[in-house]
């Protein structure tokens, strides 16, 4: 590759990188706030769970039974050729 082609390529990559960093910086406050909100929600849920010690919690086997999907069935039928 010629030196000028490589220089143009590097400039284009640098411009894209700068644009990505600028975009990430714009979203940083959103994701920081989201993270803090999720931590607070987790604390609240854990506190509620501790306040209800007599609550019956499902075992792993019960959870597996409720989450198990049924048989796969196609949503369409293939026309039979005669």
Image (spheres, rainbow, N blue to C red):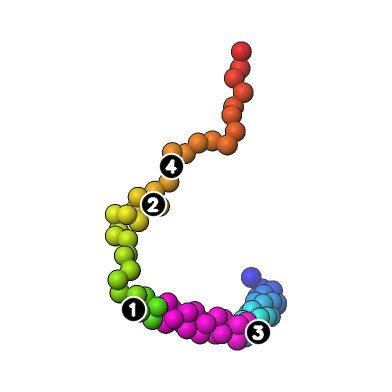
Q: Is residue 25 visible?
A: yes
Q: Residues within 10 Å of mark 3 (few under 14, many from 20)?
A: few
* Horizontal side of residue 23 vs 34, given as left or right: right
**Sequence-first tag of 2 and 3:** 3
Label 1: which secondary element: helix
**Sequence-first tag of 1 and 3:** 3
- Residue at 40% of width from left, 52% of height from top? 67
Rendered view: 65 above or below 71: below
- Residue at 58% of width from left, 36% of height from top? 75
Rendered view: 54 above or below 11: above
9 is within the stretch colored magenta: no
Label 3: which secondary element: helix
**Sequence-first tag of 1 and 2:** 1
Q: Which mark is residue 26?
A: 3
How far apart are the two marked residues, 1 and 2, measured between alpha carbons? 24 Å
* Horizontal side of residue 19 vs 48, given as left or right: right
- Which portion, as a residue range, is magenta? 26-45
How far apart are the two marked residues, 4 and 2, measured between alpha carbons? 10 Å
How far apart are the two marked residues, 2 and 3, measured between alpha carbons? 42 Å
Label 2: which secondary element: helix
Q: Which mark is residue 50?
A: 1
**Residue indicated by mark 2:** 66
Instruction: Single out the mark in the foreground, 2 or 3.
Output: 2
**Residue indicated by mark 4:** 70
């Amino acid at each position: 590759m010629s030196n000028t082609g490589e220089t143009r390529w590097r400039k284009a990559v640098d411009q894209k990188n700068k644009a990505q960093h600028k975009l990430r910086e714009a979203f940083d406050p959103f994701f920081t706030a989201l993270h803090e909100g999720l931590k607070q929600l987790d604390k609240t849920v854990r506190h509620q769970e501790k306040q209800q010690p007599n609550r019956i919690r499902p075992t792993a086997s019960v959870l597996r039974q409720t989450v198990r999907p049924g048989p796969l069935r196609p949503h369409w039928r293939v026309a039979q050729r005669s």
